[in-house]
């Protein structure tokens, strides 16, 4: 397998976690004889400082010419005074739109050894394995018209939530296709009792479901879904929803995983797939070796699964992560002084590589016999 990967380390802890994700991908390449090449480019605050823009043209061109993009994080308080279209986050939104990935996949899993890191009771979250499929390029984040008005006595602002049947159908098919690989259930989340866009969403998803007779479909209002995620997360398999609701719900579900540092994501469906952890830039701990790289490493596993079609290698990375956690190793965000061993960002990456190598060696030994 040959793969050309564009790296966008970005701001804050982004470079630290991406370094460990690359370390794991390189281990996969060495074990399997694959040819993976990497090119680093600027995005976000570091790009503003060096080029004056959060998404330089050279970065976008490199991303569009690659097989996949692996991104760390963007954002820093020092840029909060800039106009919205010049802030680091504008670069992220722009590259998502340019690459065309309309379906954002966010897996949320409860790893048994870190269940006590969640504020929820272990008996509630044990065994939880949810995949959020969030529509990424439509809805209120991109709808027009939008803006602010200073007319009259009281200034106002406005945004437009807009969806077409085509936008809803394409992301719904992603969700149903993923459900076929899992436990064959889709929960479609909307607010159809209030919003016309949600009424169209529900109608369209219901029609798409007819093409997937072996997948169970349920509809759930977003407020009810938010409650059930906390009180009964085991009821969910694949959660399908629009942009704003998906943004909020998938972050809420981080409490199940125990930390935002555990969460990966993939933006697929466009010209080039984009992979990134969801934890943000965390500038307060940047450069201190405290960041959890497992979300970035899990994002690398998703890259191998969805872009490279290396299912076994992706499974091996996820198994290695589990093994490291079962062995009691933790970064600061997961630390339990009574039972765990403290690991730095690079230390956790090294442990995953070591475990990954052991898993591959066992498989080779088994096949040799």
Image (cartoon, rainbow, N blue to C red):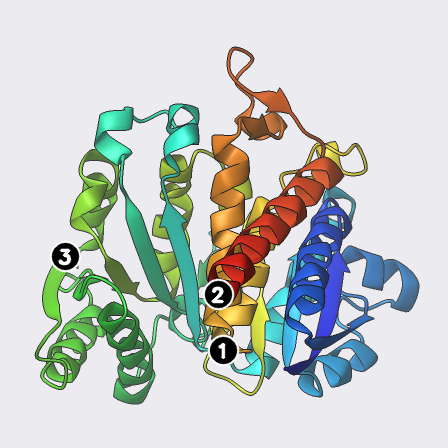
Mark 3 and mark 2: Cα distance apart in space: 46 Å
How many C-alpha atoms fall within 10 Å of the one at disc 1: few (<14), some, or many (≥20)?
Answer: few
Tell me the residue at 37%/24% (across/down): 119
Quarter that holds the N terminus: bottom right
Q: In this view, does 227 lie above or below 95?
A: above
Tell me the residue at 51%/34% (across/down): 325
Q: Position of residue 317 (x, y in %)?
A: 54, 55
Q: Residue 221 carries which label?
A: none
How many C-alpha atoms fall within 10 Å of the one at disc 3: few (<14), some, or many (≥20)?
Answer: some
How many C-alpha atoms fall within 10 Å of the one at disc 2: few (<14), some, or many (≥20)?
Answer: few
Q: Where is residue 307 in the image (x, y as percent from the top left)?
A: 53, 78
Question: Do the residues under discs 3 and 2 have CB atoms within 8 angstroms?
Answer: no
Give the camera-side residue of 340 and 229: 340
> Which residue matches tag 2?
367
Question: Do the residues under discs 3 and 1 have CB atoms within 8 angstroms?
Answer: no
Tell me the residue at 49%/52% (across/down): 318
> Which residue matches tag 3?
220
Any part of residue 233 in sight:
yes
Tag 1's secondary structure?
loop
Mark 3 and mark 1: Cα distance apart in space: 32 Å
Indicate which label's residue lies in the foreground, 3 or 2. Answer: 2
> Which residue matches tag 1?
309
Tag 3's secondary structure?
strand
Mark with earlier residue (2, 1): 1
């Amino acid at each position: 397998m040959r793969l050309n990967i564009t790296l966008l380390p970005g701001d804050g802890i982004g470079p630290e976690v991406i370094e460990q994700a690359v370390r794991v991908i390189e281990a996969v390449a060495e074990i399997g004889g694959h040819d993976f090449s990497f090119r680093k480019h600027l995005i976000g605050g570091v790009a503003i400082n060096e080029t004056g823009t959060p998404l330089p043209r050279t970065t976008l061109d490199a991303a569009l010419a690659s097989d996949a993009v692996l991104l760390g994080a963007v954002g820093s308080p020092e840029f909060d005074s800039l106009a919205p279209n010049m802030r680091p986050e504008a670069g992220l939104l722009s590259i998502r739109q340019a690459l065309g990935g309309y379906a954002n996949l966010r897996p949320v899993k409860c790893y048994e050894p870190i269940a006590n890191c969640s504020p929820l009771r272990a008996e509630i979250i044990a065994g939880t394995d949810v995949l959020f499929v969030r529509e990424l390029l439509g809805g209120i984040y991109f709808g027009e018209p939008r803006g602010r008005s200073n007319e009259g006595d009281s200034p106002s602002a406005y945004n437009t939530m807009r969806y077409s049947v085509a936008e809803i159908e394409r992301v719904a098919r992603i969700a149903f296709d993923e459900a076929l690989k899992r436990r064959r259930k889709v929960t479609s989340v909307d607010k159809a009792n209030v919003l016309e866009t949600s009424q169209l969403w529900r109608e369209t998803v219901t029609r798409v479901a007819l093409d997937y007779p072996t997948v169970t479909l349920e509809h759930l209002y977003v407020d009810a879904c938010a409650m059930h995620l906390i009180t009964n997360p085991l009821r969910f398999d694949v959660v399908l929803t629009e942009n704003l609701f998906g943004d909020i719900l998938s972050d809420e579900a981080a409490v199940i995983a125990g930390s935002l540092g555990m969460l990966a994501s993939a933006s697929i469906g466009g010209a080039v797939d984009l992979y990134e952890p969801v934890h943000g830039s965390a500038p307060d701990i940047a450069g201190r070796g405290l960041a959890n790289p497992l979300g970035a490493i899990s994002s690398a596993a998703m890259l191998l699964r969805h872009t490279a079609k290396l299912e076994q290698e992706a499974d091996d990375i996820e198994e290695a992560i589990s093994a490291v956690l079962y062995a009691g190793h933790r970064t600061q965000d997961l630390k339990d002084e009574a039972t765990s061993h403290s690991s730095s960002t690079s230390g956790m990456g090294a442990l995953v590589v070591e475990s990954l190598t052991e898993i591959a060696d066992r498989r080779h030994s088994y096949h040799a016999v």
